[in-house]
Amino acid sequence: MNFDRTDEQVMLSETARRVGEKFGLDYWREIDAKKEFPAAAWQEICDAGLCGIAVPEEYGGAGLGMSEMAMAIEALCAAGGGSTLSQLFMCNPIFGGITLTKFGSKAQKEELLPALVSGKARFAMALTEPDAGTNTLGMKAFARADGNGWRLRGQKIWITAVPQATKLLVVARTQKAGDVRRKTDGISLFLIDVDREGLTHTAIDKVGTNTLPSSAVFFEDVRIEGHELIGTLDGGFRDLLDVLNTERIVTTSGLVGAAELAIRLAVDYAKERKVFGDAAIGSYQSLQFPLAEARIKLECARLMNHKAATLYDQGQPYGSEANMAKYLAGHAAGLATDRAIQTLGGMGYSKEYHVERLWRDARLFRVAPVSEEMILNYVAQHDLGLPRSY
């Protein structure tokens, strides 16, 4: 196992760091307060070629892999954006880029991948439903055949960045659950315009990740054309798993970057702050140990995530590694951001010092895009060979 980075990977990470620092802590604090989409930061990321890292060269991308994407996201998030910045990569290079690259038609790739790379096209994915969160197979959104296309009815919830998206990757049943031999059959993927008759959305008020809105989305007989099908009709669930597992890698990268940033802010403060006498508070083991523990956990998450990304790039199974990395990263970021607040004391609770935003945003990712409990279920069943427990 080789831990050395290539010259290209080092250059890529350095580019990401510079872009991230251009849109640093103050930028993210300001747009978080305004609940404003980071349009300028995302366009700069696209202009620097970072959105197209894993897009094939023939469509304007760099033709690199998930390993390089993970490295770039870590550097971007650690420079100031924190974990929520990684959601921009979930929505675009994953829901858009990976889906199109692996399962899109030639015409779909030619139309949308260059637009993704340039930032002209933005993506969101509509999967979760009010009664089908973790239980994806319980989805009720249904696309009935209608001529050479479909008519979609249903509701989705907690869908990220819908108002800013031009395209929406919709996961829906195309066969009723009672009519299929296996529960995973009869599910299809469609890539449709967000601006379409019958499609409406409303924002959800939430605790954090304010720069990327979450929405409830409603479909009232929304027309889907035949060419908007992605992958195989009725066989979309197997394709979806590949999309979701790469989403785990991107999520972990953001959490690793956020944990690294929170620890750095805490350490810098602890080196300067004095309370009793001349000794800085960073000399107290009660502050040192939790930050050291968080650093240990984030490095373990980073390594497992890069193993998952490497396996993906090699075409090998990577689901267990991606899930384990996400579990570790959720705990590392949770500990790092919480202890950063504790280190700063009262100032940690103020918006001036930034760590409260990192804490609010990181908390989401112990629940989403997959909960810690479901990861433990997955590992118990798939890695330990124990009976399915749910």
Image (spheres, grey):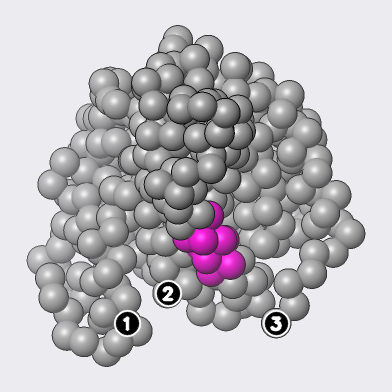
Question: Which numbered circle lies on residue 320?
Answer: 2
Spatial separation of the CA atoms under disc 2 and disc 3: 18 Å
- Between the C-alphas of marks 3 and 1, the distance is 24 Å
Q: Quadrant of the C terminus?
A: bottom left
Q: x, y percentage for residue 242?
A: 47, 65
Residue ID at (31%, 66%): 375
Q: Position of residue 16 (x, y in %)?
A: 74, 40
Could you say whether the residue bearing mark 3 is in a helix, strand or loop? loop
Magenta region: which residues? 295-305
Residue 369: tell me if it is visible: no
Dot 1 amino acid type: His
Sequence order check, earlier mark of 1 and 2: 2
- How far across and down, in percent of the image, does residue 167 sit? 50, 34
Residue type, numbered disc 3: Met
The mark found on residue 1 in the picture is 3
Instruction: Please check the rendered image and state whether residue 304 is part of the magenta-colored stretch, yes or no.
Output: yes
Q: Are marks 3 and 1 in contact (CB under 8 Å)?
A: no
Q: Does 174 appear above or below 282? A: below
Residue at horizontal 50%, vertical 35%? 281
Residue 378 lies, with reference to residue 68, above or below; the image says: below
* Residue 263 relative to residue 328: left or right: right
Q: Is residue 323 left or right of residue 203?
A: right
Task: Determine the residue located farthest toward the right in the rendered image.
Answer: 7
Q: Main secondary structure of the magenta part?
A: helix
